[in-house]
Image (cartoon, rainbow, N blue to C red):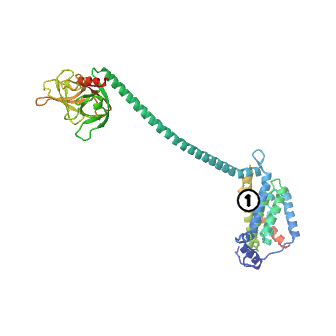
Amino acid sequence: MPVAPEREVEVFRIRYLTLVVSGLAALLLQTVLPVVIPIAGLMDFPLVITVYFTLIRQNKIFGIALGTGLGLMQDALSHGYLGLFGMSKAVVGYLAAAAAMRFNFETLFARCVVTGALVIIHDLCMAGLQHALLDSPPPFLPLERASAVLFNVALALILFPLLDRFR
Amino acid sequence: MTFDPNSPETAAPAQAVARDGPNVQAFIAHHRAAFILAAVLVAQLLLLSLQITRNHDVRLIRVWAVAAVDPFQRSLRGITEVSVGAWRTYRGLLHAQQENQELRIQLASAQSQLQQLSEQAAESGRLRTMLEFKNQLPFQTVAAEVIASSPGENSNAIFIDKGLDAGLASDLAVITPEGIIGKTIAVFSRSAQVLLLTDPSSGVGVMLEKTRVQGVLKGDRQSLCLIRYIMNDVPISPGEAVLSSGLDQIFPKGLRVGTVVEASVGNIYKNVEVKPAADLSRLETVLVVLKPNSNEQQASNTRP
């Protein structure tokens, strides 16, 4: 992952239709797929979508807005409290944009690495918020979370080339 | 997306900022995304706090509000209590200081009054004793106050406030209820000088109470006196009382003079040390024994 602070920033324009459809599809898959395939519950489609579009757009405010929007919708569709996913994904969007402005993520490998790192950060944010705010926070299972990182990286390996076709 | 203060886009705001003084706006513009992230997080945190409940369904925002305000309330209450306490302590100290000053004045006054009363009581007792002693005596006496002592280390004498006007004359016995103290040697119109027993030039005819052996009491410049002319074979024991013999024609017979302190064998006569019965260093009121002729003369003078 080469450092290129003085590189020419290559910012891609995003088709908003692609963004909206991808977001809605991610939310839909996040709610439906675990019912059919339980292990798919380890995957976080909105998170991967947030990371992808923020890396492409390279805009912190965009990353915050996208992460917050998808996270809040994910909260709304779940039975949890409104704001847990929203806050975590807002942080992920901000960090993804900051990283994209500083490093070159043109290669798929670099994107997968940053995706894995951001999944870990997302998990840490969630766990931290739950432990700080909830009376009885869910237990933190390191093995499960490690599996989630791998699954989400694998998801990124599949989704990122697919989404690249629409930019 | 990085902030460059030299770029054309930021030149105008930079000039405005320069006019404004502190570079706050440039800082905000540079970290705009971070501020937005913070605002978004705070907003969602508030949203969460409205949903989450703790401790018997108390909403988290209320818990946080109380937790946020409580330290200030406690601090304010602590500051108030400390301030009120300090003010009360200050006022109490002021009051205590004034009260202390008043009490000190009252104490000084009370001590002075007590000392005066004590002095008066002591004087009253002394005078009562003196009056009783005077009434018991079979001869005429005149009471006198000691007003001074004679200057000089070799002089054991005092001055009393009675003199010729009171019928005093030279060689009159001066006594107290405790015992004899000396004799008048110089008499003035309103005062007289009294030679004490302890003066070396003093001489008093004395006798021992038990053996009735007689001698002459002489002064020794110290607080003790010596009895001369008592033979070595006369048994004398310490503690034996010494009385006036009356042979000197000055001191009436039988008055207490002192107590034998020590008696040792000398060349011919015994060396007998006597401690005067009266405390010669603390004389205040004394009685001067008038001679019979003086008494008659005084009586004739007082008759119209």
Q: Nearer the viewer, residue B163 or B57?
A: B163
Please say if B62 is above or below B111: below
In the figure, residue B124 lies in which quadrant? top left
Where does residue B108 sit, x and y in percent of width and height? Answer: 46, 39
User: Which quadrant of the rendered structure holds the C terminus of chain B?
Assistant: top left
In the figure, residue B133 lies in which quadrant? top left
Residue that badge 1 annotates:
A125
The residue positioned 76% from the left and 79% from the top of the image is B8
Question: Is disc 1 placed on a helix, strand or loop?
Answer: helix
The residue positioned 22% from the left and 35% from the top of the image is B199
Callout 1 amino acid: Cys
**Residue placed furthest toward the left:** B268
Q: Is residue A160 left or right of residue B206?
A: right
Where does residue B106 sit, x and y in percent of width and height? Answer: 50, 38
Please say if B10 is above or below A152: below
Q: Is residue A153 in sight in this rendering?
A: no
Q: Is residue B74 in sight in this rendering?
A: yes
Q: Is residue A98 left or right of residue B257?
A: right
Q: Nearer the viewer, residue B12 or B2?
A: B12
Q: Nearer the viewer, residue B167 or B69?
A: B167
Q: Nearer the viewer, residue A72 or B252?
A: B252
Mark 1 packing: few (<14 Cα in 10 Å), some, or many (20+)? some
Where does residue A33 sit, x and y in percent of width and height? Answer: 85, 59
User: Which quadrant of the rendered structure holds the N terminus of chain B?
Assistant: bottom right
The residue positioned 22% from the left and 36% from the top of the image is B221
